[in-house]
Image (cartoon, rainbow, N blue to C red):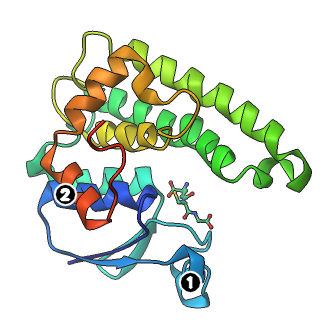
Amino acid sequence: MYTLYGSPSTAGTAIHWLLLELGVPFDLKLLDFDKGEHKTPDYLALNPDGVVPTLIVDGAPITQMAGIATLLAERHPEAGFAPALGSIARAEYLSWTLWLANSFQPHFRAWFYPHEPAGESAQEAAKAAARVKIEAGLARLDAHLAGRDYMVGDRFSTVDLLTTILCRWSRNMPKPATEWPNLKRYLDRMRQRPALREVHAREGLTDWIDG
Ligand SMILES: N[C@@H](CCC(=O)N[C@@H](CS)C(=O)NCC(=O)O)C(=O)O
C-alpha cells in the first residue's frame, strides 16, 4: 500500500494520475496549502523542501515527481510504463525524464514562484524570463512530437505522464502548450486517457481536461 501526499493541481497530481493508471491501492492525503499543511514539522520530516509530492513506499518517504514516477514504473513492470533496463529506449526515457525534471520543470517553478529566483522587487522580470524558457521548451517538445504519438517509442510511458502534466501547467500562460500543433494533437489524445480524466474528477479540477 502506498500513501501519497499531494495537493490538487500540483506535481502531486502527476503521481495521483500514475497510481490510477497502475490500478494499485493507495491512501491519498491532499494537503491544504492555504493552511500551510505542507510546512508543518511532521510533513517537513517527510519532505524537507515542504513541497508535494511525497510517496510513502514500504514506510520510506520518497520525493521528487520524476523520481517517484520512474520508481513506480520500475515497481510495476507489468504496466510497461518504462523501457527495459539497459536498452537504448531506456536511455531515451531517462534522458527525457531528466530533461523534463531538470531543464524544463524549474522554469515553471520560477513562473509560479517568481520571488524565489528574483526577490520581491524583480518578479515581473523573473516571470518574463521564465516564459521565454517555457516557450522554448514547449517548442522543443512540439518538434519532437512531429509524427509521433508518444515521447519515447510507440507506447505510453511515465515520460508522457510528466510531459502532459507540465504542459497542463502552461494552460493559463500567454502561449499555452495547446497552441503548438503537434503538442495539441498529442495532449488531445492524452486527455482521453480515463485515469487522467479520473484524477481531474477526484481533485475537483474542471479546466483544461476538455480542451
Ligand atoms: N522538484 C520538486 C518540485 C515540487 C514542487 O515544486 N511542488 C509544488 C507544487 S507543483 C509545491 O509543493 N509547492 C508548494 C511550496 O513550494 O510551498 C518535484 O518535482 O517534486
Q: Residue 111: x percent and y percent?
A: 66, 44
Against 183, residue 197 (above or below) is below
**Which corner quadrant holds the C terminus?**
top left
The secondary element bearing badge 1 is classed as helix
Q: Is residue 96 left or right of residue 158?
A: right
Against 146, residue 133 (above or below) is below
Give the residue type that dot 1 points to.
Ala
Q: Residue furthest right?
A: 121
Residue 83 visible in the picture? no
Residue at image x 36%, y 23%? 183
In-front residue for pair 164/204: 204
Q: Residue 199: x percent and y percent?
A: 25, 59
Q: Residue furthest bottom?
A: 42
Q: Residue 90: x percent and y percent?
A: 29, 32
In-front residue for pair 86/128: 128
The secondary element bearing badge 2 is classed as helix
Against 208, residue 188 (above or below) is above
Instruction: Kindly report the distance in space between the C-alpha atoms of the residues bearing marks 1 and 2.
Output: 30 Å
Residue identified by numbered label 1: 45
Against 1, residue 18 (above or below) is above
- Mark 1 or 2, nearer chain start: 1
Mark 2 surroundings: few (<14), some (14-19) or many (≥20) residues within 10 A: some
Residue at image x 53%, y 83%? 43
Ligand 1 quadrant assignment: bottom right
Q: Nearer the viewer, mark 1 or mark 2?
A: 2
Give the residue type that dot 2 points to.
Glu
Residue identified by numbered label 2: 198
Residue 97 visible in the picture? yes
